[in-house]
Image (cartoon, helix red, strand yellow):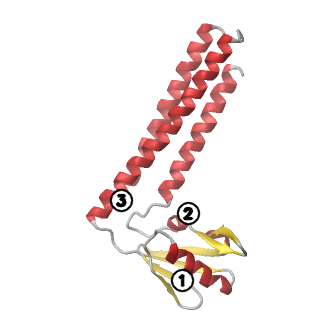
Amino acid sequence: MNSAQILKDAEDRMEKALDVFRNDLKGLRSGRASPGMLDALRVEYYGSPTPIKNIASVTCPDASSIVIKPYQAEDLKEIEKAIRSSDLGLAPNNDGKTIRLSIPAMSGDQRKKLVAQIKKQAESAKVSCRNIRRDGNKHFDDAEKAKTMTEDDRDKGKAKVQDLLKAYETKIDDLGGKKEKEVMEQ
């Protein structure tokens, strides 16, 4: 692997870690309704777990409710069952055609717990990026030992991987900070 390939691989993997963190944040409840809250929810659909958005339209008519309208009426019961068994803590209201979810206001304690969870997920994403940096540095060391790269090139490459890590840690902090601020708003 040459220097450009190692850096490209590290950047691609850090971007994936950032995407995982971004998707984790979408699924967190922030006090206002959002279709993203149901992204992690899987519904039994012909024997296989399927994302809810693949079998129903999910909309938010206002800030405190979510309306789920299945594409096929027979899926209503399975969607309701999946919501009841999830850890969302929401009670589905089924009218025969749609399911309505009322999102209650969050207490101060719930908000603080959620902020702690966001910080934990952010740290986990940073650890993933640091592991990617370690792998990149190892590739540079291996290339230098194999005499396909000079010591100077190895050191420059390691510095670039470190800069990449700092950039992705900043992105993770920004995303986490925005979500924390959103959760703490009342």
Quarter occupied by residue 122: top left
Residue 119 image position (x, y, % from top left): 38, 47
How much space separates mark 2 and mark 3, taking CA atoms?
19 Å
Residue 18 image position (x, y, % from top left): 54, 44
Query: Dot 2, how many residues are within 10 Å of its Cα: few (below 14), some (14-19), or many (20+)?
Result: some
Query: Dot 3, how many residues are within 10 Å of its Cα: few (below 14), some (14-19), or many (20+)?
Result: many
Disc 2 marks a residue whose amino acid type is: Ala
In this image, 71 relative to 169: left or right? right
Q: Residue at x 56, y 63 (%)?
A: 40
Q: Which image quadrant: the N terminus?
A: top right
How much space separates mark 3 and mark 1, taking CA atoms?
25 Å
Disc 2 + disc 1, Cβ < 8 Å: no
The residue beneath circle 1 is: 99
The residue beneath circle 3 is: 183
Tell me: residue 113, above or below residue 99: above
The residue beneath circle 2 is: 40
Disc 3 + disc 1, Cβ < 8 Å: no
